[in-house]
Amino acid sequence: LSSDTPLQLAESYFKLYPEETDPIWGNPCDDPKHQKIWSKNKSCDSLPKFLVIGPQKTGTTALYTFLSIHPSIASNLPSTETFEEIQFFNANNYYKGLDWYMNFFPVDVNSSRYMFEKSATYFDGDLVPKRVHALLPHTKLVTILISPAKRAYSWYQHIKAHGDTIANNYSFHQVITAGDTAPKPLRELRNRCLNPGKYSQHLERWLTYFPPQQLHIIDGEILKSNPIEVMDELQKFLKITPQFNYTGHLRYDEKKKFYCQVLNGERTKCLGKSKGRHYPPMEEKSLKLLQRYYLSHNTALVKLLKRIGMRNVPQWLQDDLTDSP
Ligand code: A3P
């Protein structure tokens, strides 16, 4: 009796099933055969119950911070490799495997807590909804939306502040108007700046895998002006009881001009300088151009929001549509 080596077997297998070369991780406990060979000291509870999926620059750090104040909610352990975010489902970290991901959610420490992770790049990642669904079909998804024009501008300011050479050599207007003959790095930057704001496209992709009941959309402008209301609504959506009363834990800080965490009933602890940055307002011509650019996407977004039962269309969305030239 003889057999090929494991490597030869794998090569023959993937020749027959090339579509399986890219792995898709499922939950080992969903399949009795897998569960049987799953190590005894591992738990399938080492997974988050909800994900804050972004997109970037919509207030995801503020939401993450407010959630972390909640006594029955816990985020993942910090990642030494990817700064504060795990970025498992969208990036090469996915190939590090399930164990790598699950180690961020130790059940012994957080036994009764509602675990979550926030990775703002999940929102617009092509493969992310499919991968999330394979592992966490019942997870709840939380997204924050602001005007896509404003988001693009905030993102540009963000990477400029991080020393991106292209962003430092080209104005925002030059970036968003870069044509298809522009240098490749500039075109790439333009795409990274503008693509996440095509909200309806990205949400439709999530909705092909998840029912709308699992998706919660936060109006990012209300997160800024009334985070207490936003946190109340979010807790209802997550069905977290007893509800934690954020009044007294969040307070508007006159200096920061944003809501901040209240420490010991007195001092406020605000997010760092990189959140709520100071920069000149967007030029009118850029705003008009972007409102026109996002017109079809914003129109589709209104339809999508109505279809999934969102009662109030955000004010910024109405404004972007009515101001569009
Ligand atoms: P700006 O710095 O452009 O104003 P993210 O955390 O997803 O990167 O989003 C950053 C944005 O969060 C900031 O963009 C800011 O407008 C917004 N934000 C919302 N609530 C905030 C808060 N309480 N403190 C600081 N920034 C907040």
Image (spheres, rainbow, N blue to C red):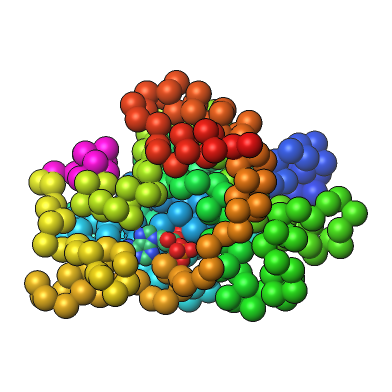
When the figure is inspected, residue 254 is found, relative to residue 17, above or below; the finding is below
Question: Quadrant of the rendered structure where residue 308 is?
Answer: top left
* Residue in view at x 27 percent, y 38 percent: 237
In this view, the residue farthest toward the right is 181
Residue 20, how many percent across, how many down? 70, 41
Question: Quadrant of the rendered structure where residue 235 is?
Answer: top left
Q: Quadrant of ligand 1?
A: bottom left
When the figure is inspected, residue 285 is found, relative to residue 17, above or below; the finding is below
* Residue in view at x 45 percent, y 21 percent: 307
When the figure is inspected, residue 236 is found, relative to residue 254, above or below; the finding is above
Q: Main secondary structure of the magenta part?
A: helix
Question: Quadrant of the rendered structure where residue 136 is?
Answer: top left
Asked whether residue 40 is drawn in magenta, I would say no
Asked whether residue 235 is drawn in magenta, I would say yes
In front of the other: 199 or 284: 284
Q: Is residue 48 left or right of residue 28?
A: left
When the figure is inspected, residue 304 is found, relative to residue 110, above or below; the finding is above
Q: Is residue 36 left or right of residue 288?
A: left
In front of the other: 52 or 29: 52
Judge whether residue 195 can be spotted in this image.
no
Residue 217, how many percent across, how many down? 39, 39
* Residue in view at x 31 percent, y 67 percent: 257
In this view, the residue farthest toward the top is 307
User: For the C terminus, which image quadrant?
Assistant: top right
Magenta-highlighted residues: 232-241
Residue 47, how many percent across, how many down? 37, 52
Judge whether residue 185 can be spotted in this image.
yes
* Residue in view at x 41 percent, y 57 percent: 59
User: For the N terminus, which image quadrant?
Assistant: top right
